Image (cartoon, rainbow, N blue to C red):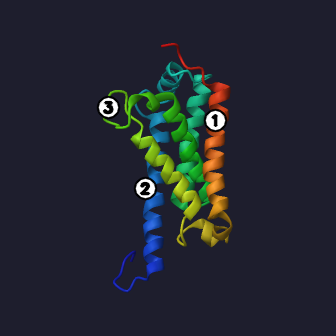
Amino acid sequence: MLWSPDMSDADAMDLALLAFRCGVGAVMLAHGYNHIWGGGKIHGTAGWFGSMGMRPPLVQAWLASMTEIVGGTLLVIGLLTPFGGAAVVGTMFVAWAINHRGNGFFIFRPGEGWEYVMTLGLCGMLLGAIGPGSWSLDDWLGLRDDLTGMPGLAVAAGAGLGGALVLLAACWRPPAR
């Protein structure tokens, strides 16, 4: 049973972290899945990425989709959690830069504002710093203590933002407006 009246504070924290990381991971998995198999499939995603200036668009569509799927999977199973967090931070920063940044804060605004990508990016940083909790493969493999705190935050924020900035510098050519 996941919950009982005699649950300890540590168990409650582990349950909350399990739910949180599975929720964020599921969102990322759904995004990656939808980019490849939903709507216009991977070629539709590539066309959309190309229209926003990502080059080469098919490579970028696959890179973003697989980053979301792998990062989401890492979060759900609680394995190498800061790297899963970095995947969230990086993909959400790129989404902010190329699509949401100029559309205001609220997601319901025309063009979709940036509140959603900011929230998910912060979730990725949080999971990198706090870690997956005891109910995770990181804990089972003895990695949890080495991957939380400042090292986890550095990986999630540093690798996520650093990777996004390198990708944008190398592959993004904003279309003329």
Q: Which mark lies nearer to you, 2 or 1?
A: 1
Left or right position of 139 against 72? right
Nearer-N-terminus badge (1/3)? 3
Q: In the rendered structure, are the residues bearing label 2 and label 1 in contact, judged by CB atoms less than 8 Å apart? A: no
Residue 121 at least partly seen: yes
Residue kind at label 3, given as amino acid type = Arg
Residue 176 in the image: above or below residue 142: above
Residue kind at label 1, given as amino acid type = Leu
Nearer-N-terminus badge (3/2)? 2
Q: Which mark lies nearer to you, 3 or 2?
A: 3
Q: Secondary structure at mark 2?
A: helix
Residue 97 is situated, as x and y percent measured from the top left of the image, at 52, 32
Residue 42 is situated, as x and y percent measured from the top left of the image, at 51, 29
Q: Residues within 10 Å of mark 2 (few under 14, many from 20)?
A: some
Instruction: Tell me the residue at 35%/37% (across/down).
Output: 107
Looking at this view, is 160 or 134 the one in front?
Answer: 160
Residue 131 at least partly seen: no
Extreme-top residue of the structure: 176
Residue 23 - label: 2
Q: Residues within 10 Å of mark 3 (few under 14, many from 20)?
A: few
Residue 71 - label: none
Q: In the rendered structure, are the residues bearing label 3 and label 2 in contact, judged by CB atoms less than 8 Å apart? A: no
Residue 59 is situated, as x and y percent measured from the top left of the image, at 62, 28
In the rendered image, which residue does mark 1 sit on? 165
In the rendered image, which residue does mark 3 sit on? 109
Residue 47 in the image: above or below residue 152: above
Instruction: Tell me the residue at 39%/77% (across/down).
Output: 1
